[in-house]
Image (cartoon, coloured by chain):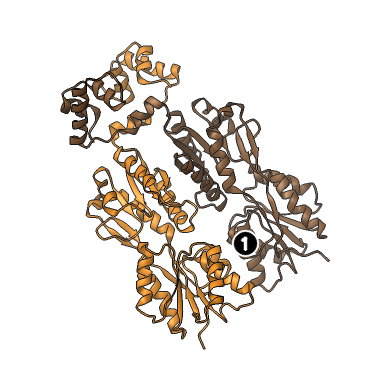
Chain colours: A brown, B orange
Amino acid sequence: MTNIRDLAREANVSVTTVSRVLNDHPYVANEKRQAVREAIEKLGYIRNQTAVHLSTGMTKTVGVMLPFVDHPYHAAILQGIAQAAFDASYRFLTWQTNYVETHEQLALDALAQQEIDALIVVSHSLPLSAILSYEQYGPIVFCEHHEDVAAVYIDHYTAFQQGLAHLRQQGHTSIGICLGRPDSTNSLARKHAYQEVVRDEFVYEQTLTIEDGATVARRWMQQKQRPTAILTASDHVAAGLILELRKQGYQVPGDLSVIGFDGSELAEVLAMTTIAIPYATIGRHAFQLTVREDLVARPQIEVPSTFIAGTTVLPHT
Amino acid sequence: MTNIRDLAREANVSVTTVSRVLNDHPYVANEKRQAVREAIEKLGYIRNQTAVHLSTGMTKTVGVMLPFVDHPYHAAILQGIAQAAFDASYRFLTWQTNYVETHEQLALDALAQQEIDALIVVSHSLPLSAILSYEQYGPIVFCEHHEDVAAVYIDHYTAFQQGLAHLRQQGHTSIGICLGRPDSTNSLARKHAYQEVVRDEFVYEQTLTIEDGATVARRWMQQKQRPTAILTASDHVAAGLILELRKQGYQVPGDLSVIGFDGSELAEVLAMTTIAIPYATIGRHAFQLTVREDLVARPQIEVPSTFIAGTTVLPHT
């Protein structure tokens, strides 16, 4: 590729002169400016953006560290980031990490090397302190709650309380919950809300997909003691649970009341009772935080969840 | 940030010596090598990846130009790219273009500036020739069919023929279709397959979302002459159509047979008859093409679609 030295040779001027012409510096003789412009045209020179970065100190690129591009929750946050980045004429560089720490490290390295202006961490495996040690290189914004970090998040404790309160108002006392990764920050908050209101525990862990929901249905059918209602942590799990039970001849909500979580299209088409999370809003706020001037104060934005009454909960009789 | 000149000053050696140490060049005196290493440790130098690129000529980054991150079709292709990139230890830089040409241009500029090793074009507005003029800078792979480009694609003509043949086998002669953007390459191929087998045309254009499907339902209800079956170009549109008709007291498939398109989770939970497209496979193949040695020969990979019999088509009586 043509570089600034090729231009200097072609135009028979110094590299400094080429640089001045490229940067619209006033002190360049007109004939030299003209010679450089002709060289640019002749050689088809395209300005190297990295050089632009060195002068402005900005890449206009935001990095996104996220475990899975195809996880509906993460994909929806990414969409919000993408939209806000598009509106601000930023690009985004994505690291799908699969929760592998060496892959998470690549995103941190990119911040240290100033390949990106800021990093949005959708979810992570690395210790928080390891990530925060890179704050010296640029803004880091999290999409989950931690003490004393810049973050946009859902209060999963309160969101789960909403769902549990609804089930109890409907007379359910034997209530189960489905969780994802058992030790994640979100799961711990959800379990906390659950353990405050129930005595017998029905916790179905490691549930993420429609297939996992079907597995929960089969476990429920085999249980002697079983809950009359299940609050899930994902519409996908709820959909799998509902469809498998109906396939096996059970009534939802007649035999089991089910509440989803996410407020996704699956909940919409199944007319599911669910807790809607504005994921795209989280992504949009996260992008906007990265460019906020008071970011050093590590601002936090809590995004509210919304209970949506559907057709998959009946009063317990 | 510490740079190579800071290291040279700290170690009291030349910049060239620092560069040789960083690149494991053999001809460096041991004490100088040691001094540079101590400077690296003392100053907390992190190697600038751009410099690495200049020597290897590789960024290990693939660019993705796609209209919408949240479009289910595009998101699924992106997921396939992400997985293949992850497996190959590549990152991906995404431009969500919203079909705006100036945004598409940014992705092409990045290829010209060697910020990315290759570019995957999921869909585009710019003329094909404008995009191909950037092939001199690196591989460009398309996820839709064009003559004489490197591409991974679905034959939408054949896919639509599959759906239409099924409806005709079931006795339907009055058949409608839903299309997306009316002039897109895919829509033209679909319309072509349609016009070969029908006389009266029922074409519903600009349909992309669940809401658009509900609009088609309302239009269908108001039509005096109306089709007995509709083949859509998206499970989302089919879902909206089915749910709105059922809400208004019509039977699907009793009053109208409906076929989706995509093979998405929506089709799964609604037990929809659909044509499944392996979008993630398209993305994976597209990434793999970018690193193929015979890419200059512009290879093309056609990915087959699969008819999935569900519960939303009945024979016409």
Taking depth in this image into account, of B191 and B1 the one nearest to the observer is B191
Q: Look at 46% across and 43% down and name the residue there.
A: A86
Q: Is residue B190 visible?
A: yes
Which residue reaches farthest bottom?
B317
Q: Is residue A106 above or below residue B303?
A: above
Above or below: residue A1 compared with residue A314: above
Compare residues A151 and A53 and report the one nearer the observer.
A53
Q: Position of residue A39 (x, y in %)?
A: 19, 31
Q: Considering the numbered disc 1 on the image, is that residue within a helix, a strand or a loop? A: helix
Residue A245 at x, y = what percent?
67, 68
Which residue occupies 26% across, 57% down? Answer: B299
Judging depth in this view, the residue of A214 and A309 nearest the camera is: A309
Extreme residue toward the top, this view: B12
Query: Which residue was labeled with disc 1?
Result: A268
Where does the N terminus of chain B fall, quadrant-wise? top left
Q: Chain of mark 1?
A: A
Which residue is at a point 41% across and 44% down the rendered structure image? B92
Q: Amino acid at mark 1?
A: Glu
Circle 1 packing at 10 Å, graded few (<14), some (14-19), many (20+), is some
Q: For residue B289, say whether it is visible.
A: no
Quadrant position of residue A27: top left
Quarter of the image for residue B149 reads bottom left
Q: Position of residue A280 (x, y in %)?
A: 57, 48
Left or right: residue A135 compared with residue A312: left
Q: Quadrant of residue A314?
A: bottom right
Q: Residue at x 37, y 26 (%)?
A: A54
- How many numbered markers are drawn? 1
Q: Position of residue A101 (x, y in %)?
A: 51, 38
Above or below A20: residue A49: below
